Image (spheres, grey):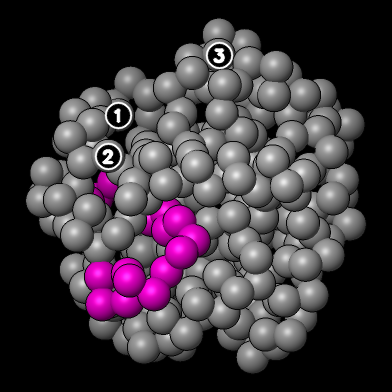
Amino acid sequence: MGKERLVNYLNQLQNENKNLFVPYIMAGDGGLNKLKERTLFLQNCGVAAIEVGIPFSDPVADGPTIQNAGKRSLDNDTTLTAVLEELESFKDERTVPIIIMAYSNPIYRYGIERFAASCVHAGIDGLIIPDLTLEEEKMVTDALQQSSVAFIRLAALTSSRERIKTLAHRSEGFLYAVTVTGTTGVRTSYETKVKTYLHQLKQQSPVPVLAGFGVSTSKQAKELSSYCDGVVVGSKIVDLFHEGKTEEIKQLIQASI
């Protein structure tokens, strides 16, 4: 479980010459009872890991699609505690690593050491906190070191070379490369500088580099994966689940890996 399982799983897929595909889903969107069904469906599609979002009232990194999914989830009274309990209830049926994406405030309110322990009980392998900077991350890293949960860092297009080097060497499991200077959401193209940036990250990073924010087609996923190790896809997956288009999700994943 935890960091070791995430690393081993990603290594196994890379040894099979597969691009890494990590879908994002919002826990509680459509009801918390959908979480197991969607997780196991994605697992069967051949994903590298699943990023499970915790709804939050002020999601600064999220575009309209994920904001709306978070609102629907909050309207269903979804809480961090409920999500962790639900994930724990079917942890023995999962073979794919699970990554929690949560903002600082819910984790802080839950209690950082308690949260780290709950992640272990729920079979969580990794954690992403998009509003926690390098300078502030010690508030969680000490507790996570005791729990074996991988702490995945995000690198930005605006990050300096020195900062990129630090992020790359501190990130566990993989390095999340944000490919836009903005929020999440579907985009039609990427600037040339994105490819240069991904190449730079690959040179610096001892862990796999995954590109995220705006990836919505298998063509984009393949293109970006040629410069790094794979992609994280959020808004498109959230939209397709909301519209009940699971076959399109399966096709997107299988055409991207």
Residue 235, position in %: x, y?
Answer: 63, 66
Magenta stretch holds residue 248: no
Could you classify mark 3 by the number of other residues whose Cα lies within 10 Å: few (under 14), some (14-19), or many (20 or more)?
Answer: some
Q: Amino acid at mark 2?
A: Ser
Query: What is the span of residues highlighted in magenta in the rendered image?
Result: 88-109
User: Could you tell me which secondary element the residue under label 3 belongs to?
Assistant: helix
In the rendered image of this protein, does residue 59 appear above or below residue 92? above
Q: Which residue is mark 3?
A: 165
Q: Are marks 1 and 2 in contact (CB under 8 Å)?
A: no
Quadrant location of residue 98? bottom left
Could you classify mark 2 by the number of other residues whose Cα lies within 10 Å: few (under 14), some (14-19), or many (20 or more)?
Answer: many
Q: Could one spot residue 30 in this view of the protein?
A: yes
Q: How many numbered marks, from 0 up?
A: 3
Residue shown at 81%/33% (left/top)? Answer: 227
Magenta stretch holds residue 89: yes
Judged by depth in the image, the label closer to the viewer, 3 or 2, is 2
In the rendered image of this protein, does residue 118 appear above or below residue 194? below
